[in-house]
Amino acid sequence: MQFILRWHILILFLLVLIPLGRAHAAPLPSGRPTVIEVGVQPLGYPAAMIGTVLGHDAILRRELAASGYSLKLVPFRKGNDMVDLIGTSLSAAIVGDMPAIRMAIRSDVCMVGLTKKTFTSVVARNISLLAQLKRKRVGYPEGSSAHHTLLQALASVGLTEQDVRLVPMDIDAMPPSIEAGDVDAFVAWEPAPTLTLVKNTEARVLFRGASSDFFLVSGSLVRRDPQAALSLSAALVRALNWLRQSNANLQQAALWAAKDAESLNPRLQKLPQTHVIEITRREILDVPAAPVIVRLSGHPPLKEEFYFLKKLGKIPAGADYQRVERAFAYDGLQQVLKSPQRYRLGEFEYRP
């Protein structure tokens, strides 16, 4: 009788223990990802500089680790390649104006801050007027902010995409392509224009269109873990503060960025470091108030670009600008700037 009783007790113990073991091994019910992936663009400046500094930020990595996350930077050749990934595999990204608009109307995103405020250029060889692009071969990165600039340039002289021979092309392929005569012109952000102008006396800029880059986070991350989103916002401010602090910091970031770019294209034409630093200063570090997105009365962010692209059929006819407006309503950057000590905006710990 005692043997049977002991046997029953053992069975009951095992029945309790086994489910507990299974529960311990199962994933969290929330299904929360443990990796925060940030889309970056190592082939463009100043995006490459900001992206690489974020990746070397030990403070950011520790703060995310405290919430159960690790940080992973995912390189892309252009922002349009990230549009369908934000909110799924990507939690944050650095993208230009046209991809930012497309992200906002397709998914839930929150614009954190400005990462570039400058111009994107149409560069040609042996051509002096925009109108002369008619029937010429023009390299362009489809769906990007440079694509938007090309549309503006053509419209300014009464041309459309159908009037030129469009050649889809990655940014890093443009300088060697125009040099080899494979295209007559291209539209691109830095460093492609400077690389071409430095090397070819026959090359010239035909058009410059205003262009911006933004650091954004997915709305799903903001809702799920607002503190993680604020940590990313703080890292953007900290990165710009560190870059502004000294020329030595800019030189270090340029070395990191060059290494990141080489991993995407080992045969990439390299721009001298002095030019990289000059571009970074001009296009973001010397921009007043950056990374704050300045909102001018009567000129909501990207509204003119939105309706221009809608008119040309580059975004759906039913797209609503209010979705873009809501994306810019995110106040994460303002929260961070109000508490500089809490978010360690003046502390720097960047590791190789």
Image (tube, grey):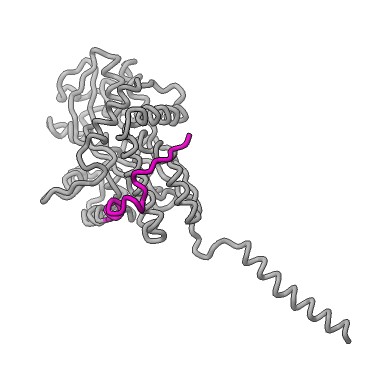
Instruction: Estimate the x, y position of residue 282 in percent, counting from the top left.
Output: 24, 30
Q: Is residue 187 magenta?
A: no
Asked if residue 341 is positioned above or below residue 261 in the image, the reply reads below
Q: Can residue 258 be seen from the camera position used here?
A: yes
Q: Quadrant of residue 267?
A: top left
**Which residue: 24% across, 42% down?**
290
Asked if residue 153 is positioned above or below residue 15 in the image, the reply reads above
Judge from the rendering whether residue 20 lies leftward or rightward of residue 302; answer left or right: right
Which of the pair 322/69 is nearer the observer? 69
Which of the pair 181/298 is nearer the observer? 298
Which of the pair 6/132 is nearer the observer? 6
Judge from the rendering whether residue 257 lies leftward or rightward of residue 209; answer left or right: right
| Magenta region | 330-352
Asked if residue 313 is positioned above or below residue 198 in the image, the reply reads below
**Which residue: 43% across, 30% down?**
256
Asked if residue 261 is positioned above or below residue 143 in the image, the reply reads above
Magenta stretch secondary structure, dominant: loop
Instruction: Estimate the x, y position of residue 299 in percent, counting from the top left.
Output: 13, 48
Judge from the rendering whether residue 205 lies leftward or rightward of residue 276; answer left or right: left
**Which residue: 31% across, 27% down?**
277
Q: Quadrant of residue 203?
A: top left
**Which residue: 36% across, 46% down?**
83
Please identify the quadrant where the N terminus is shown. Answer: bottom right
Q: Can residue 166 be seen from the camera position used here?
A: no
Instruction: Estimate the x, y position of residue 58 in percent, counting from the top left.
Output: 46, 43
